[in-house]
Amino acid sequence: MLFAQKLGKINSILLLSIVYFVIIGIMSLVVRILRKDLLHKKIDPVRTSYWQNRPSSEPTLERHKFQF
């Protein structure tokens, strides 16, 4: 029984690690090949500010009732 538990723990760690690195690895390669800046980290020397305005919405009771 102890052997099976240790084998299961090793097996789950190994399989989850492989799945994680394969998925993250493939996604990172695709993003690098397509040269996408998903986090908008590139510096634009022409811009004076990186502030992004949000569209304002009407302050209603329904909006404040469900805040989250």
Image (cartoon, rainbow, N blue to C red):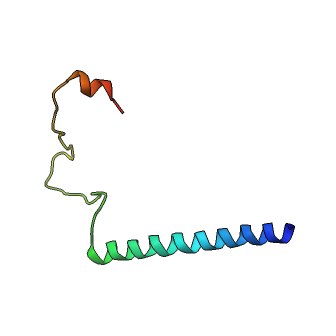
Q: Residue at x 73, y 69 (%)?
A: 8
Q: How far across and down, in percent of the image, does residue 19 sit?
A: 53, 72
Residue 5 lies left or right of residue 39; in this view the side is right
Q: Residue at x 27, y 72 (%)?
A: 35
| Extreme-top residue of the structure | 61
56 and 44: which is toward the camera: 56
Q: Quadrant of residue 49?
A: top left
All told, the count of numbered labels is: 0
Q: Which residue is pictured at 86% across the width and 68% down the height?
A: 1
Residue 13 coordinates in the image, percent (x, y): 66, 68
Classify 19 as above or below 59: below
x%, y% of residue 31?
32, 72
When the figure is inspected, residue 15 is found, relative to residue 43, above or below; the finding is below
User: Which of the pair 50/46 is nearer the observer?
Assistant: 50
**The C terminus - image quarter:** top left
- Quadrant position of residue 12: bottom right
Left or right: where 66 falls relative to 12: left
Of residue 68 and residue 28, the one placed in the foreground of this image is 68
Q: Is residue 66 above or below residue 30?
A: above
The picture places residue 15, in percent across and down from the top left corner, at 61, 73
